[in-house]
Image (cartoon, rainbow, N blue to C red):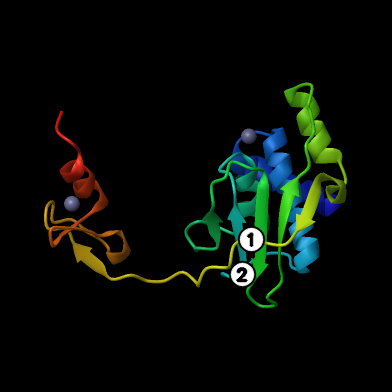
Amino acid sequence: MNNSNEDWKKCREFHGHECGGLAIGFQAARYARELLQADTSEDEEIVCITENDACGVDAIQVMLSCTAGKGNLLFHMTGKQAFSFYSRRTGKSFRLLLKPHQSASREESLQYYRDSDYHDLFEVMDTRIILPQEARIFQSVECDECHERTAENHIRLENGRKLCPDCFRLYSRPLI
Ligand SMILES: [Zn+2]
Ligand SMILES: [Zn+2]
């Protein structure tokens, strides 16, 4: 329990407050550590695909070192309290889906998710999404309209002109 108290403190500091949502991510990360037999993700070894962008994602970042900047935290927005984890080293993967629980209040929610045994909180299932390739480096390309540069995978073509997402939207907006 000592280690987990330390971990909870780190999550709370990073997130800025404590709440039931943070506790959900905290418990998912602890479960993932156990199933992956790993403590942290040194680089891109552990990948998390989260299905929401709520409080719990902050705990995943702290506990597993899955971060957006490293490319090993990905969003697949279904709005569900579900997180898929992958180990690139072992090839193991699984999806944790939070079981429904009706909380009477914010305090009760925090207490319930923080103090429950994480094995009871989640359903463990197979992943549905194939693990994407490791973070790729894209060449940068100049937009023909604003002349700002962007990664080539963001460039759109409009009548043969290369446009960044902002200029593409302006150009394609219908006139009313
Ligand atoms: Zn929160
Ligand atoms: Zn542009």
Three-letter code, disc 1:
Arg
Q: Residue furthest bottom?
A: 89
Secondary structure category for the residue under label 1? loop
Q: Is residue 86 above or below residue 49?
A: below
Q: Residues within 10 Å of mark 1 (few under 14, many from 20)?
A: few
Sequence-earlier tag: 2 or 1: 2
Q: Amino acid at mark 2?
A: Glu
In the foreground, 91 or 171: 171
Q: In terms of image quadrants, where is residue 24?
A: top right
Residue 31 picture quarter: bottom right
Q: Secondary structure at mark 2?
A: loop
Does residue 88 lie above or below 101 as drawn?
A: below
Image check: 161 left or right of 60? left
63 on left or right of 116: left
Q: Quadrant of ligand 1?
A: top right
**Local crowd at mark 2 within 10 Å, few (<14), some, or many (≥20)?**
few
Q: Nearer the viewer, mark 2 or mark 1?
A: 1
Kindly check if marks 2 and 1 are in contact, taking CB atoms under 8 A apart as contact.
no
Q: Is residue 35 visible?
A: yes
Q: Residue at x 63, y 74 (%)?
A: 88
- Determine the residue positioned at 80% across, 26% down: 108
Label annotation for residue 42: 2
Q: Nearer the viewer, residue 53 or 43?
A: 53
User: Residue placed at 79% from the left, 64% from the top?
Assistant: 35
Quadrant where the C terminus lies? Answer: top left
- In the rendered image, residue 164, in percent from the top left (x then y), is placed at 22, 54
Q: Position of residue 5 (x, y in %)?
A: 80, 46
Q: Is mark 1 within 8 Å of ligand 1?
A: no
Specify the label residue 128 is tagged with.
1
